[in-house]
Amino acid sequence: MSRRIAGPAGKLAVDDGGTGDSVLFVHSVAGNTRHWSAQLEHLRKTRRAVALDLRGHGKSDAAGNGDYAVEAQATDVAAVADALGLERFALVGHSMGAGVALAYAGAHPERVTHLLVADPIGDGTQTPEAEVRPFLDALDSPAYVGVIEEYWSSIAGSNGAVLERLLRDLRETARETVVRGLHAVMAFDPHPALARFRGPTLAVVTPANDYSYSMHRLGGGLPHLVVEGTGHWLQLDRPAEFNRILDRFLEE
């Protein structure tokens, strides 16, 4: 069932279905609920599975207050959980959405039964300035389209159909949403939320996501699995494998 609910910065689109223990999915920058289609279909055989479009994405309103900080977007998750009556639920996030999921789990640890972060963002504050500043400056310039599409293509992997889909979603997402979202990623420090949420956590990462500031390397480190031969959007590239990992984790 698709519906729109009141969020803290505008209306939020939600895809809700199934019955049983609940799982809530959070997409990446320029993503939407459809990035989780394979997971929603799979889980709804035995569970309630919910996905939302974050502010400015998919069918949700742009942020009326212009705030795309990771912690601010976590309040979208809170609004959805409250509106749907999800008292205790598993939380799954991808990329920026993993940071959003973590921020929610850190703020509401008593409500999150499991946290799975798929190729998550890391500590943006530790990313070397010399590496990230030219990219962010280019996003704020007339070169935006070429720069962002080249970057998406470089991390999407070898599946041409997936890349075509991702570029279509990117083009349909407002530039302000993408640019402010990526700036927010670079300003996000996961440490406080990691310290507050001590529940079952799993990072599912690609080989390229292995820096000292990657989320699964921070603090004492997170349990993690590496999925080879896929691009950044591993739930789209390898849905069956991702679903098996998710099943095993949720059954722990």
Image (cartoon, rainbow, N blue to C red):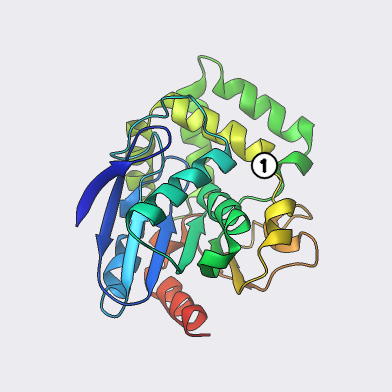
The three-letter amino acid code for the residue at tag 1 is: Phe
Secondary structure category for the residue under label 1: loop
Q: Position of residue 236 (x, y in %)?
A: 39, 60
Q: In which quarter of the view is residue 19 placed?
A: bottom left
Q: 30 left or right of 67?
A: left
Is residue 153 left or right of 188 when viewed as pictured?
A: left
Report which residue position mark 1 lands on: 188
| 102 relative to 70, above or below | below
Number of on-image labels: 1
Quarter-wise, where is residue 196 in the image? bottom right
Horizontal side, residue 215 vs residue 15: left or right: right
Asked whether 114 or 184 is in front, the reply is 114
The residue closer to the viewer here, 192 or 249, is 192
Query: Can you give x and y, in whole percent of width and height, for residue 110 in the image?
Result: 57, 66
Q: Is residue 35 visible?
A: no
Name the one closer to the observer, 190 or 119.
190
Looking at the image, which is closer to me, 97 or 175? 97
